Image (spheres, helix red, strand yellow):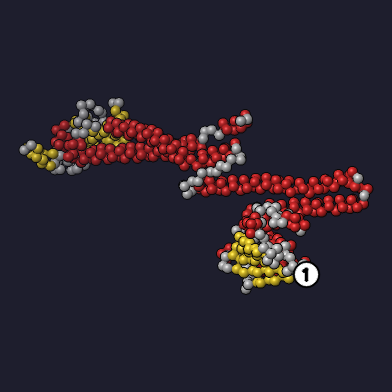
């Protein structure tokens, strides 16, 4: 392999499988990260809102209970107001009835700190041993503050007596967020672990899926590489059962490969056939030229004979080359003329009338069973060429009875054209060979009649290319009938 090709091959790495796996990995990473961030933010915000409502409800409950006092608050009055409540329930615990207030469970929570102050901002009651001063005397909504190295919600409410409307003290609550931060850190850890696991699993799954779905492309690449190394090898892309675009791609690739190989074979066959058939006329012309060069140019009779023979061989070579080109084009009909259309009655009548004019000594009978014009799936020039080849053969190989019958009829899908002569006929052993290239039943007579043995090959190739068919019936010494069928254009295709 050349250095340039080696460099190009190296530039193709990494493979498409790795790229697809990495793309899947990156996509899942981004999606999961966004999901984790949204989940984290939503959970944290919900928890913070819940804790805020908890401290606000507890603080407003304490404020409401303390507001029942008429005098400035002190330890005794604050304690009695907080502990006693009409909301208490009697609960049976091991045979003993205990008065349980649900509010006490909130106030007694380890993270909840309650401080009650008198109107002079002196601390009179606390659920915490720490003596925390009043943060401010004005009402303060629950906000996150740092107190004594601890972070939590701080809320301050002044207390006014319900009866006297006088200021009797203040309530300050502080709710530590220790549990919140523990949950927050745990949630972050869980999300990080889940993201790591998902990335590993997505990488493995992405690679396996990409390898599975790109396997047809790998097969296609390997097949193309084998063909590149050995163009003559009979290698095809394996048939895929995926029923998707890749299966269509494999089918199209095989069809393209068949077409390319047919073109290559056609070219090789064309060169071989032309070189083989031109060998004889070239040798004849060369022989006559050598004869003239030695002594024939001084002999008028030899000169005339050599020139006449050479001109005849040149004409035959010209005809041969033209027929070879026609045969080559006939094998490429599906590429250039697949959408062409032709009127059947019009062309058949035209060709028959032309032959009547060219061969006045012959009787051409046309049996037209078509009640209306039929449109055929064939290029007009090719349809004319088919008729001319078969009718020309009928004229060439007619004997004493100079008569040719042409009939045209149709069914729902195809038109049938039959051309019958009353000439030599074809031996049974030769019937299956007459469509072969350069095959002549009677080579000596065929050459005198100007035939190269390519006309029927061209006709068969044209008919096959247009999805038609041709058959021959012959009786030695009595004549031959050629029948060929061409598809008719359906109503939905017009």
Name which quarter of the figure residue 29 lies in: top left
Q: Nearer the viewer, residue 103 or 67?
A: 103
User: Residue 23's spot in the image, x, y percent?
Assistant: 47, 38
Q: Residue at x 64, y 53 (%)?
A: 335
Note whether 133 is above or below 336 in the view shown: above
Is 277 displayed left or right of 472 in the figure? Answer: right
> Does the rendering let one see residue 232?
yes
Is 378 displayed left or right of 399 in the figure? Answer: left
- Badge 1 is on which residue? 360
Q: Nearer the viewer, residue 399 or 261?
A: 399
Note whether 377 is above or below 275 in the view shown: below
> Which element carries disc 1, helix, strand or loop?
loop
Is 94 displayed left or right of 50 in the figure? Answer: left
Quadrant where the C terminus sits is: bottom right
Note whether 157 is above or below 354 in the view shown: above
Q: Residue at x 13, y 41 (%)?
A: 88
User: Residue 482's spot in the image, x, y percent?
Assistant: 65, 63
Q: Residue at x 18, y 43 (%)?
A: 163
Quadrant where the N terminus sits is: top right
Question: Residue pushed farthest right?
Answer: 298
Q: Residue at x 25, y 37 (%)?
A: 55
């Amino acid at each position: 392999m050349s250095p340039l090709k080696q460099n190009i091959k190296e530039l193709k790495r990494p493979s498409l499988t790795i790229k697809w796996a990495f793309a899947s990995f990156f996509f899942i990473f981004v999606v999961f990260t966004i999901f984790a961030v949204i989940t984290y933010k939503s959970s944290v915000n919900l928890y913070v809102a819940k804790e805020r409502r908890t401290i606000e409800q507890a603080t407003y409950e304490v404020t409401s209970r303390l507001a029942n006092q008429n005098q400035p608050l002190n330890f005794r009055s604050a304690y009695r107001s907080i502990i006693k409540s009409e909301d208490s329930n009697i609960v049976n615990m091991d045979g003993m009835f205990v008065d349980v207030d649900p509010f006490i469970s909130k106030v007694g929570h380890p993270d909840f700190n309650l401080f009650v102050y008198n109107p002079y901002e002196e601390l009179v009651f606390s659920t915490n041993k720490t003596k925390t001063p009043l943060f401010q005397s004005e009402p303060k909504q629950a906000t996150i503050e740092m107190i004594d190295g601890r972070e939590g919600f701080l809320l301050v409410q002044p207390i006014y007596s319900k009866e006297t409307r006088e200021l009797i003290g203040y309530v300050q609550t502080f709710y530590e967020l220790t549990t919140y931060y523990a949950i927050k850190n745990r949630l972050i850890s869980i999300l990080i672990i889940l993201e790591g696991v998902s990335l590993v699993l997505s990488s493995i799954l992405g690679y396996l899926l990409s390898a599975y779905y790109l396997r047809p492309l790998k097969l296609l690449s390997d097949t193309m590489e084998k063909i590149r190394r050995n163009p003559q090898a009979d290698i095809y892309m394996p048939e895929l059962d995926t029923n998707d675009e890749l299966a269509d791609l494999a089918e199209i690739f095989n069809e393209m490969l068949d077409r390319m190989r047919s073109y290559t074979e056609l070219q090789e066959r064309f060169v071989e056939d032309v070189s083989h058939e031109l060998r004889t006329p070239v040798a004849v012309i060369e022989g006559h030229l050598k004869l003239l060069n030695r002594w024939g140019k001084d002999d008028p009779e030899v000169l005339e004979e050599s020139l006449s023979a050479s001109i005849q061989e040149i004409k035959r070579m010209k005809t041969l080359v033209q027929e070879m080109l026609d045969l080559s084009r006939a094998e490429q009909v599906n590429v250039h003329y697949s959408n062409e259309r032709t009127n059947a009655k019009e062309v058949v009548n035209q060709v028959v009338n032309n032959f009547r004019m060219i061969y006045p000594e012959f009787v051409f009978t046309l049996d037209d069973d078509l009640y209306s014009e039929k449109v055929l799936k064939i290029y007009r020039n090719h349809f004319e060429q088919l008729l001319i080849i078969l009718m020309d053969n009928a004229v060439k190989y007619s004997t004493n009875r100079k008569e040719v019958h042409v009939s045209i009829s149709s069914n729902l899908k195809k038109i049938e054209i039959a051309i019958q002569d009353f000439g030599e006929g074809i031996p049974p052993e030769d019937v299956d060979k007459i469509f072969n290239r350069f095959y002549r039943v009677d080579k000596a007579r065929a050459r005198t009649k100007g035939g190269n043995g390519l006309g029927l090959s061209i006709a068969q190739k044209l008919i096959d290319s247009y999805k038609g068919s041709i058959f021959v019936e012959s009786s030695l010494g009595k004549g031959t009938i050629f029948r060929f069928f061409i598809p008719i254009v359906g109503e939905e295709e017009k």
